[in-house]
Image (cartoon, coloured by chain):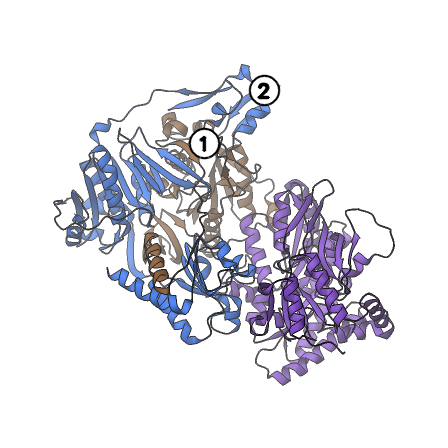
Amino acid sequence: MGQLVCNQDKVNELNIEELIKVCPFGAIEYTDGKIEVNAGCKMCKLCVKKGPVGVMEFIETETKKVNKDLWKGISVYVDHVGGSIHPVTMELIGKARDLAAVVHFPVYCVFIGYHIKEKAEELLQYGVDEIFVYDYEELKDFRIEPYAAALEDFINKVKPSSLLIGATTLGRSLAPRVAARFRTGLTADCTILDMKENTDLVQIRPAFGGNIMAQIICSNTRPQLATVRYKVMNAPEKQFNSKGLITVCEIAKTKLKSNIEVLKVVKKKTEENISDAEVIIAVGRAFKSEKDMTMIEDLAELLHAQIAGTRPLVEAGLIHAKKQIGLSGRTVKPKLIITLGISGAVQFVAGMNNAEHIFAINQDERAPIFNVAHYGIVGDIYEIVPKLINDIKSSVIM
Amino acid sequence: MDYKKIDDKDIEFLVSVLDKERVFTGERIHNDFSHDELGKISKMPDVVVEVLTTNEVSKIMKYAYDHRIPVVARGSGTGLVGACVAIYGGIMINMSKMNKILELDEDNLALTVEPGVLLMEISKFVEEHDLFYPPDPGEKSATIAGNINTNAGGMRAVKYGVTRDYIRGLEIVLPDGKIIEVGGKVVKNSSGYSIKDLICGSEGTLGIVTKAILKLIPLPKKVISLLIPFTNLDMAINTVQKIVKSKVVPTAIEFMQREVILAAEEYLGKKFPDNSSDAYLLLTFDGNSTQEIENSYEKVADICLEEGALDVFITDTEERKEAVWSARGAFLEAVKASTTDMDECDVVVPRNKVAEFIKYTDELQKQFHVRIRSFGHAGDGNLHVYILKDDLTKTAWEEKLSKVFEAMYSKSRELKGLVSGEHGIGFAKKHYLLEQYGSDYLELMKNIKLSIDTKNILNPGKVCQ
Amino acid sequence: MDIFVCIKQVPGTSKVEVDPVTGVLKRDGIDSKMNPYDLFALETALRMKEQMGGIIKVISMGPPQAKDVIKEAYMMGADEGILVTDRKFAGADVLATSYTISQGVRKMGKFDLILCGKQTTDGDTAQVGPEMAEYLGIPHITNVISIIEIKEKSMIVEMDMPDTIEVAQIQFPCLLTVEKDIFQPRLPSYRKKIATKDREIKVLTLNDFEDKDEKKYGLNGSPTQVERIFPPAINNDRETWTGSGEQLSLKLTAKLKELKFI
């Protein structure tokens, strides 16, 4: 640790403006003939590196170092609601195994819930060395205090070096609570994780709405906490001869008290607003009848997609006006959009060109939609879509 | 009118100038080319051609002139009065592929573009260079030549004027195929009749724009809007005159009523920041610093409060602007989605008559038992009034429509207003133009048309014919 | 009800780029605004006050210029504003920030509820709320999508979970982070702007805190370090596929699987 110090004697009229400007956070102020760094400072140290030479200096100070040898293992929090395990968990186990291999650590899971012991058996098949289970009635529904208490108990008992948690709404509630309890670092929404030889976890995440990437480490405290989004890492294949252990942990019931009472847990209604949809199947005027739409509904169901379309389809009464994408309709920014038989008029494209992955199927290889599509598929929708439905179905079964 | 029918030889000629890929006939002509945005007037052209150069346009015009074939030039087809519909068939020239930005001249603050460049592309391009093309019609996917030909207005007309005010020069292909240039990069021009200004707003009847030089201004760094609720529309509109008199110039003064806001909320599935009042004014100010804008808007805000505004809401961030302006942008579609069919009029009246006109449409609504919705540019007197079909039968609707239109246009004449503020006359509003101007004026327009287009082949049957 | 709303000043635009050569953050001017997600928290507080009465205090940590967002909150209807600022807070990461604000809240006395936005647009970590709740020793619920009922000593809310919605009753005092769009935030009012022109903004510095241990604040209280920042890889790939229906369908299925959409 340390602090930024300004060598005031090196500040002069020539470099003062340069110095103030170099700070992207506007945290360097010149008041009463003195340079001050205010609370806006993010310690990016750009003023030291890129500012006028020698003016700003970063002075390291002695900090208490953690004994990293006492903290071993990469653990994964098992994200679930009522025992149904969220697939991000398997993806994290996959990543944990990669990370653990670098420093020869075991991979642990911590599973907190009620009537979950059998589910834990299944998880062993993904190559986990040991699963620590907290199985109490008080842990039936997610409530922050008892869940945090159980996780705290696990950390104290096992002393894992790193703890990976799914960046689901649940994980993003639990992880910071526990990080604060241990006064340790937590990096949210990591997209890339790596392991240093000294067991420091390299955590890379997008910031400023994805406009920049930041590489973060947490070298003086343990455990190191990171949350990771679903569908970023790869789940490992199941193994059939799993050698892992299941350890049932005990915790004092007094620690499981809560000021929250869960009244009910209900299944989410499917989101109807295309503006918020993650996956969209967009159809164009190549579609002529209600019957065609049935085929699209099948595909949409398989991909958990919402159906949207172009203006002519609205005018033909095949889709509702609220499902129209484009300048005169909605603007959408899904993770995936598949356009079917859409030529790609500017009015339409302006409403969807910020989608993360754009697939376009169109017969006319000169269609302007292919200028914006990441994957342009030249072909007949009536031929491809039914096959696609079958292929997806069979690939899901596998 | 006696025009030559398109035959194989004509097609052969077109193919020889362009190539097969860019000449469309029969089945290959997309249905879109038979109508414009409103779709009321419809007729298929005999052949649609895609042009890429001025020379191609010139050759086609010369041929059409020699053979007396009607020609219609078309951009994005976003018009609302049928101006780009080939009512006599013939050749339709699709200009939308001539869509290159040719030159940005930062010394002269001028942008040279091809006719098919879209309005939204222009604003995006110049803003990246800290410059500003102020005309701001609602339809951003319209082409610049389409805008020039209707002399489109838009939201910022109060402060910055309309398209015509930003056209420095044009390259035009005349009906006989000759190419001329009018205006230029010059700021002043007192050199004879201003053909350039005649072309602006001529709806494709006098010549085909193949290049345009646009005037740019420095980009104002900040924009802030005020959303001002009133207990009724009267109070809101009456305040507009006070604002205009105050000598502070907003870029836009729009009015909106709760019904339209609710329709937009329903259409977008999103709440508007405030829907508790009956009527609103939406004012926009631009300038180079927040301080500068605050100074001017505070004066206006005080006037509004004195005039009985319930409050003045400040719309200063991306999110707030999005919440307000996305609704404003969706009004037309929202009103459309709320009914089975509709027709619109875009009369323009002197600014101090806006309230009277709106009140009158409200009376018409009751008198004819038909739903009428309006919103628009209170600051420049240009009103967009929509008459909704709802569950009326086609005949009942058409009958009512013509009566309501007749009544509205006659009211507009009484108030010294004009038939169209920014959508043009095209085919649909010809009758009302005649009523407005009378035969002497129309005769003059016809003579101008025929002196330039002696064989009457360029977009015939429109505006004054 | 006594409600705290945590607000933060963030850059006016999210269009932030990193110069790939120098690694310097390019920022467009020094324009700033209230974190848009906080608007939803403030709006929630205002609606609760309309229903239950009470007082709304906004609290922000940042440089002295962050007073602007407190003024903005006054223009929306907040009653009191507190700015937590001290150069000793410089370089704070999430943990140190949460601790600092929680100290500020403690200093201000008792409360029923703390409302936070879901996350900020500059850091988007979504951690400050839960970490504060921990430091204050109160329960929290994140990602609240609606408020069902407000009672005297508790409230019932809906929490957004991965595939379900949890309906829970939570006792006061507590902390909630609210989802975007829980309510449409109102616009700042010019009338309120005039009325609150001279309203005080309370400033708290380290000296005002109960815990004055400098090691817990700013850079010294921050366990994480940013090693470097860099621009993200942008997917500008364009591929065109041709072939038979079978081939295309199989290729598409494989790609969708690779991208984890299947």
- C219 relative to C18, above or below: above
Identify which amino acid the numbered label 2 is placed on: Gly
- B190 relative to B151, above or below: above
Residue at image position (27%, 48%) is: A91
Quarter of the rendering occupied by the N terminus of chain B: bottom right
Measured from the top left, where is residue A153 in percent x and y?
20, 40
Residue under label 2: A33
Horizontal relation, residue C51 to residue B355: left or right: left
Q: Is residue A12 visible?
A: yes
Label 1: which secondary element: loop
Residue at image position (28%, 56%) is: A262
| Chain A, chosen colour in render | blue
Query: Label 1: chain?
Result: A
Identify which amino acid the numbered label 1 is placed on: Lys
Measured from the top left, where is residue B377 in percent x and y?
69, 60
Label for residue B273? none
Residue at image position (58%, 21%) is: A15
